[in-house]
Image (spheres, coloured by chain):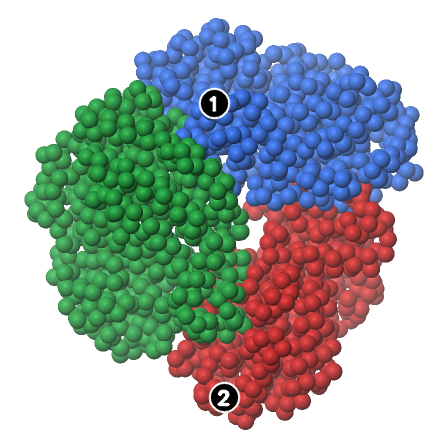
Chain colours: A red, B blue, C green
Amino acid sequence: MNRQLGVCYYPEHWPEEIWAEDARRMADTGIAWARIGEFAWSRMEPEPGRLDWGWLDRAIDTLHAAGVGVVLGTPTATPPRWMLDRHPDMLAVDAQGRPRGFGSRRHYCFSHAGYVQECRRIVTLMAERYGRHPGLVAWQTDNEYGCHDTTLSYSAAARAAFRDWLAQRYQSIDKLNRDWGNVFWSMDYASFEQIGLPNLTVTEPNPAHVMAFRRFSSDQVVRFNRAQTEVLRRHSDAPLVHNYMGRITEFDHWAVGADLDIASWDSYPLGFLSDRLEATPEHKAAYLRQGDPDMQAFHHDLYRGVGRGRWWVMEQQPGPVNWAPWNPAPLPGMARLWAWEAFAHGAEAVSYFRWRQAPMAQEQMHAGLLRPDSAPAPALAEAAQVAREIADMPEVDPARAPVALVFDYASAWAWEIQPQGADFDYFRLALAVYRGLRKAGLSVDIIAPGTADLSPWKLVFAPGLMTLPGALRQAIAAGQTTVVAGPRTNSKTEEFAIPVPLPPALPGLDVVVDRVESLPPGAQVPLAQGGAFAHWFEHLDGSAAVVQATADGRPAMVASGKLFYLAGWPDAAALGQMVRALCEGAGIATEDLPEGLRLRDTAGHRFAFNYAAHPVTWQGREIAPAGVAWWPR
Amino acid sequence: MNRQLGVCYYPEHWPEEIWAEDARRMADTGIAWARIGEFAWSRMEPEPGRLDWGWLDRAIDTLHAAGVGVVLGTPTATPPRWMLDRHPDMLAVDAQGRPRGFGSRRHYCFSHAGYVQECRRIVTLMAERYGRHPGLVAWQTDNEYGCHDTTLSYSAAARAAFRDWLAQRYQSIDKLNRDWGNVFWSMDYASFEQIGLPNLTVTEPNPAHVMAFRRFSSDQVVRFNRAQTEVLRRHSDAPLVHNYMGRITEFDHWAVGADLDIASWDSYPLGFLSDRLEATPEHKAAYLRQGDPDMQAFHHDLYRGVGRGRWWVMEQQPGPVNWAPWNPAPLPGMARLWAWEAFAHGAEAVSYFRWRQAPMAQEQMHAGLLRPDSAPAPALAEAAQVAREIADMPEVDPARAPVALVFDYASAWAWEIQPQGADFDYFRLALAVYRGLRKAGLSVDIIAPGTADLSPWKLVFAPGLMTLPGALRQAIAAGQTTVVAGPRTNSKTEEFAIPVPLPPALPGLDVVVDRVESLPPGAQVPLAQGGAFAHWFEHLDGSAAVVQATADGRPAMVASGKLFYLAGWPDAAALGQMVRALCEGAGIATEDLPEGLRLRDTAGHRFAFNYAAHPVTWQGREIAPAGVAWWPR
Amino acid sequence: MNRQLGVCYYPEHWPEEIWAEDARRMADTGIAWARIGEFAWSRMEPEPGRLDWGWLDRAIDTLHAAGVGVVLGTPTATPPRWMLDRHPDMLAVDAQGRPRGFGSRRHYCFSHAGYVQECRRIVTLMAERYGRHPGLVAWQTDNEYGCHDTTLSYSAAARAAFRDWLAQRYQSIDKLNRDWGNVFWSMDYASFEQIGLPNLTVTEPNPAHVMAFRRFSSDQVVRFNRAQTEVLRRHSDAPLVHNYMGRITEFDHWAVGADLDIASWDSYPLGFLSDRLEATPEHKAAYLRQGDPDMQAFHHDLYRGVGRGRWWVMEQQPGPVNWAPWNPAPLPGMARLWAWEAFAHGAEAVSYFRWRQAPMAQEQMHAGLLRPDSAPAPALAEAAQVAREIADMPEVDPARAPVALVFDYASAWAWEIQPQGADFDYFRLALAVYRGLRKAGLSVDIIAPGTADLSPWKLVFAPGLMTLPGALRQAIAAGQTTVVAGPRTNSKTEEFAIPVPLPPALPGLDVVVDRVESLPPGAQVPLAQGGAFAHWFEHLDGSAAVVQATADGRPAMVASGKLFYLAGWPDAAALGQMVRALCEGAGIATEDLPEGLRLRDTAGHRFAFNYAAHPVTWQGREIAPAGVAWWPR
């Protein structure tokens, strides 16, 4: 399959006189397509109903003439100022009750029917005009759903829609009262019209109430996106894609992805290290100009799953960005390494953000492939190198990994609602397990909680899964695959109650969580076989075989056949010994890697990526800082 | 006197079919009574005016039939959803101006007259129906006044009531202007109707304004509670009790307690350690699963005072809770130790919260004596052991302690309003002094600022008392008791002005506070006799004898006869040497205790409690972790 | 020239019976004048239109009779309560959208036309009455503009005025859209009436939008002040002064100062150390009772510039204050040292705040020269000593310093809007450079960005200047003076865009900033010649000579002739070696000073101030803690 480079381009930001030259330089760099249009509504429709497609026609044609295709974005993340005059109540409202105003982007509530209708209108016009354009590579819907904390809205529109959603889900208010346990604290409702949004309560609201609101809010994103995909499919055969943002868990990407053809995400390794990673200062210092060695790979594997095999990096950091607390420059070579890592994980395309650094507005300090004065920025040469290399590239067809990790958005909501310990975070737990697997040299698939067949994998981890779906339960019961569940797995019903019989209630495993402890920083439960539990420890009861114990003799991991249950949150040392032991049991080879080195196996090759700021040597090969190596498997 | 165990029970949470079995198991465990009803308004009155007492009749009768009495709670902490339709303005408003909504509990403003009237109505109905029931042990009014920061409300109802309260207190606006010093910054008012609540000002409001608002807010709690006690006394002879929450200082418990027969409090040692205690990480780690060794005892002694000798623990933590930042499990034995400690401090009853862990709603992660599946949780056996032990118990009649500590809510408000150093907190200061006394093996009484006779005690501490009440001043002047005042004692008038002549203006003590310093963390004033002042240091002027000096020769403690004034906040080492020196002077024996061990003397016995996570040996006795020992005095 | 002591006095706070005695004691202490009146509107005009000047007449006359002049403050920082009835919408609104209420001070929006008119009215009445009084020394307008975060207001009045200001500045909405780059994210406006204030946006607003709002907000302060100066000049020849507050950068002091005759500021060394200084805990501990050794001098030099040579300290801390997180007492001698340091920097007057500590209201814990009981506080004797010393004083006429530092308020706004690294702060950068100069024993002038002639100085630093004004650019091009620009110098246009050609675009210096990095705490770029860059590092391109390089060989400072560009934020060690090297090149002598010692050269003398808490010895002189020494140059 053909791997491609793309770039994000904003013709409306630049004089038309330089478009052709830009297109030529893109083509010379080896860039196959440009993503355009996704913030340009005010230029497509300067006044309500007055459309101006001329500039966009010319921009697409200019690119196409130079051999550069377009990924066309729907502009719905940035409604123009006049939209607010037509729909003054379209703004999302934050948890403090304040409308989130005009002047940046994503200033809309997913539940506002009038705005959804406006989106259908503009998308229809775009699809009719460009849906069959020969330069069209794909459609991008909106931009970075959920970014800037925009999934949850506490607006009147959201409240009305939530009540409808509740009525549809529960049918009777008595059922809702029972399912939520509203008898507790006299929270019973007499009608759906009495139900408010779960913000600004005196103390914590009913977690079942919040969980329903979180499910609803995610569904609203799915509906919003679907309103666009329905229109686009009517007028175009180009594939549909959305660009997810890193570590956004407020809506279910599996569900949004089901309506799209390709998943993509926006990869900002240095921004994420600074802004979105729990790590020690030492870890952050060691990877200051490289990014965390597992954060990108995690998302690559996640979106390969969400895209059912088809996925892109839609925005790739090329230099310092503007939005993290601190914004260092990447080590020379990282703009190449990040692209190659994506390809090795199966990306069809990597698109740098952005072609030329904008001198104005919010992102003026965000580097591009060109400087604001059109001179090359350092990443341009690295992008050109990648383009040359992929033309002559090794096979990078993804191979099925031996190990899988279940990732579930509802669990992320559940443990945000009820962390029980202040630092219990689902994404953090999942990334910790993923990191443990990668440090053992393993390639990993990330799979949906609804997965019904685990036989493709030898070993599957399912930590922190609030509710075990029926299909996955049956797949576990089938017993073909080594499965590691826990902690907290299956500890809630879908209505956010503790199930009776008590968790984990796994097929064939006689064990019950008697009580749970959350542990403050520094408090640990040492394990007999090495490492310790931190953050979380469950006291288990039952007859299941104890395969790991705490230093004081309590069960730390129990098993029955191929099914294991983990009674806590293992630290890096504990994960290290557990992963090796489990892999050995499952017949999976592991490796000892130097700090900073990571591997990825494709169908025919093994890739190695050095995230360290110094050279590393492994199996006789020295790999430079920011270096990439590959060899046949 | 008969000591009892109780338990908190919610029949409305469970199928009626299991009530009888629950009651039987309670009786078998040795539980004398169950507290019920305090959150059940929506089930007592599902619609306005439609009362449903049937289920409650049957629940009480079922318990009574099994030999389990009831403490009946008024349900006013959880008004049902329909109440908001009747009184849309009944919600408290937070300091940011946001109404505090429905969906959890305590969603009412104490000043809302309409809601107070609704409370009178439901309490009247309950009192008429159950006031003479043979199973009735006591009434609990509402639940945990002030919890979730609910004492202070910035609602329109509060503002109107505050103006009335001010008019009543000051009679003329000119007097108010003079008393508050409103000439400062042109804050003069022309009428009471011009006075707002002291939130959202540009910079800090006048502390006199805030102090008045704090006094008013406390008075509103007293009035709210009294509206219920008046009704209850009309229809019932059962004793009246309220369950205070730990470290709530926003209203005057002495004043609320004056309208009740018994004080009780809700004791969550592990939650308080995690959430409500200033301590080093090392201290918190050492007591992670035991709780702070002085926090419970402090409250026991406080509420013995508030209850004029009669007091209970209404809610006793039995296992991990759900609401603190981190929620570990207690060491085995702590559920017993905590109960015995309460009895040794004179509690008539200890009631575990709760019988069975709820699988639903906000507190589903709060342990009970039973698990959600009705199997015994670890604390059940400990409760049963306590029940057996108290049946065969040693005498635990409280003895007058040799030492007393004055505790004053107005001072807590004063120093919250004007800490002068960011970490000056009255409760923290009082607990530090209390801890210093307990580490010397002493039993302590906590007494009200209005105490008029100090002769029962040999030594009395009165740190941080903003205004010395006349009666206490006279008691000090009587000179029978060694009294230690300071720092900050008597440094404000009741109207929050600095008195002239300057503080401390104590009878017979020629000393004046020339200036004060607050000290950031790490800054200390070392003392010649050991230890140092931290947080706070006062420069003293005057002829009083210097009994302790700073290392550089300034007065640290001065005295005249039996009256001592302390010029700073002593650290643990300074308190250690001072307490020993003062006790020696007052003829009180002190002890050297190992870390984690605490004593409590009753009329006939000495009790020892080991809060350490390891065994301790003292005077030839080894006491296990979580161990309790007693022997005749 | 005659140097004077003043004091801040509030006759309205005290019984009229003691005014004469107060005046006599002031005169005896050597105090030349009292500042009065600035918070007394409610006593000047108790009801709208009912004026009461009698008390103020008598107060001024009483002081004048004792030989004490008055600086008369306009009372506009504290509008009385009745003003709100007349102008309910006059309150400023905070960034969260909440009106900032009555009950403290500065509760007005600078943009409220009705309130500005009220201010003109009261100032006219005062000016007419007292403008020719023989005791009148000067007028103070308002009090501490900008204190308590009051420069920025998000009120309806501010929004309307902002739209007018924008229309005036840009004339056409198309120009505004172009200048701001509103095409980015579809932020185009169709009319000025569509533009809101830049708060509560979903993510960051357009920095050009914020920058315009910051310029507007500063202009509103200038206009507000000018409304008063116009009135005062019509009725009085006394000089006009405003008392600026330390580290307030929200409005342009150069612009406000242009309408006044004298600049003054309020100097609270211990408060600033605790509350307004980025420093290590060790630094704060070392200077706990002295204040930072450069913070006061920085402001002295700044306001000497703002006042075009004429400047005062209007409020001098005399003892512990009430408003910082922690409030220790000054070392004995500091109240003298601070005054002498001001005089050595050219102050015409130093006025202690306040005469007598108020026992009531917000500032009751703020020390004065007298205690609340009228006994002398420790600073009284120090003030009297200073008075005696200045009567017999050495020459303190300011000499032109060899070094200047450019200080620009717009740059402070720019980097607050776009720090790019979370700890990049313009004031902090300027103070760091200033500290580096002072540690080398240098006296410094602080100059405006509009300075057109640099020839008076041998060396000029201009760090972080967002836009290089034309006049300064020409002065640099003149090449007479060694100039050190960077980092970030000239990196934005006035409309907050990156200029093309790229920064720094300095005359004759062939260098371009290729990319920038912000660095988290702990991350550094070591320099070959000593020290390191922290916070910030720019990658430079171009042919300019590299005079300092990083340890790994990249340009750290480049030069052409006398123009230097600095590519990062130097730490103390780097500044130390750079300042010495640059001074050597510019023919300026530097000194090696012990920690805590600072020098200041006047026309004829060298002064030395020991900020250390221990004696220091330098060039054979031992100077006590808090000691001041001087000798002829």
User: Residue B403 at what x, y percent from top left?
Assistant: 54, 15
Residue A52 location, quadrant: bottom right
Which amino acid type is marked by label 1? Answer: Lys
Q: As rendered, which of A629 and A228 lies closer to the eye?
A: A228
Residue B230 location, quadrant: top right
Quarter of the figure with the C terminus of chain A = bottom right
Placement of C84 over or under A224, stated as above or below: above
Left or right: residue C548 versus residue C107 is left
Residue B348 location, quadrant: top right
Residue drawn at (75%, 13%) of the image: B1
Same chain? Circles 1 and 2: no
Placement of B483 over or under C296, stated as above or below: above
Residue drawn at (79%, 64%) of the image: A472
Q: Mark 2 falls on what kind of element?
A: helix
State the residue position of label 1.
B175
User: Residue C64 at what x, y percent from top left?
Assistant: 21, 29
Residue drawn at (38%, 12%) of the image: B509
Quarter of the figure with the N terminus of chain A = bottom right
Q: As rendered, which of A383 and B103 lies closer to the eye?
A: B103
User: Residue A154 at what x, y percent from top left?
Assistant: 66, 55
Q: Mark 1 falls on what kind of element?
A: helix
Instruction: Please tell me how crowded label 1 is: few (under 14), some (14-19), or many (20+) other residues with Cα within 10 Å.
Output: few
Chain ID, mark 1: B
Chain ID, mark 2: A
Label 1 and label 2: CA atoms lie apart by 80 Å
Residue drawn at (11%, 34%) of the image: C391
Which amino acid type is marked by label 2? Answer: Ala
Instruction: Please tell me how crowded label 2 is: few (under 14), some (14-19), or many (20+) other residues with Cα within 10 Å.
Output: many
Q: As rendered, which of B247 and A39 lies closer to the eye?
A: A39
Mark linked to residue A23: 2
